[in-house]
Amino acid sequence: MRVILHCGVIAALLLSVAWATPQGADDHEGHDHGPHTADHHHHLHHGEDESHPQHEGQQSNALSKPNADFAFALYKKLSALPEPQSNIFFSPLSISMALSMLALGVKGDTFSELYQALGYAEMTPETVNVAYEHIFHMLGHEKENMQLDLSSAVALRSGASVVDKFLEDAKHYFESELFTVDFTKRDVAIEEINKYIAQQTNNTITDMVKEVDSDTLMILINCIYFRGKSCT
């Protein structure tokens, strides 16, 4: 018996933020990841058949408590909305990841408010970003009875100018892809974004986006695909 569960969350939609302006280039002091040690490289790039090495400090566990607290807080908010549905289904990890990727390109009050809401106020951006780097890598290896894949992308308006540092960090820490979209052609934009999501979820989610605004600058996409097989 096989069980297939999938969820994908698009989190975005804001976004005339600092990414499109040169001022965003120096968002956070000390944010540069710089060169990695040989141990760090092996930790993130070992062979598929190798067990995942234990890493000093367990970076990927650093977000366990704040992400769990965020999930319950978000559920409480959603369940308190007027005319709640009988079931509430969402992916808090996808939302946390997308908002954390958003935080790569903002500063000042916006950055502080994002980190406060996510429960990262006492953490440095480097700690948060490296933890997500490890999460993406750990969950990207298929095991005997389970497949759990993460993917993220930036759908950028055609012709928009974006600070290189944001795209570099999004790719480095969140394995984010970049593709351009002409949001003035709404049907085409919707088709292109949904095509990406379908590819990342083995065609289980094909119509996530149903509407876009022609003034959209950028949409951040995060998908989680899980496929498990029961043990007998």
Image (cartoon, helix red, strand yellow):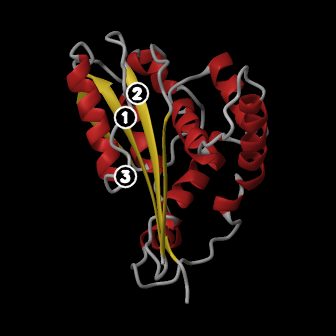
The x, y position of residue 113, in whole percent, is 71, 23
Q: Are marks 1 and 3 in contact (CB under 8 Å)?
A: no
Q: Are marks 3 and 2 in contact (CB under 8 Å)?
A: no
User: Left or right of 147: which side holds 202?
Assistant: left
Q: Earlier in the sequence, mark 3 or mark 2?
A: 3
Q: Which element carries disc 1, helix, strand or loop?
A: strand
What is the residue that sits farthest to the front in this orientation? 86
Which residue is labeled 2 in the image? 219
What is the residue that sits farthest to the bottom in this orientation? 232
Which residue is labeled 3 in the image? 204
Foreground residue among 66 and 200: 200
Q: Name the kind of residue labelled 2 in the image.
A: Ile
Between circles 1 and 3, the one closer to the viewer is 3
The answer to whether residue 116 is visible is no
Which residue is labeled 1 in the image? 154
Relative vertical location of residue 188 with respect to residue 21 in this rendering, above or below? below
**Residue at image coords 50%, 57%:** 136
| Quadrant of res 99 | top right
Q: Which element carries disc 2, helix, strand or loop?
A: strand
User: Left or right of 220: which side holds 57?
Assistant: right
Q: Earlier in the sequence, mark 1 or mark 3?
A: 1
- Real-space CA distance between mark 2 and mark 1, rounded to the nearest whole angstrom: 6 Å
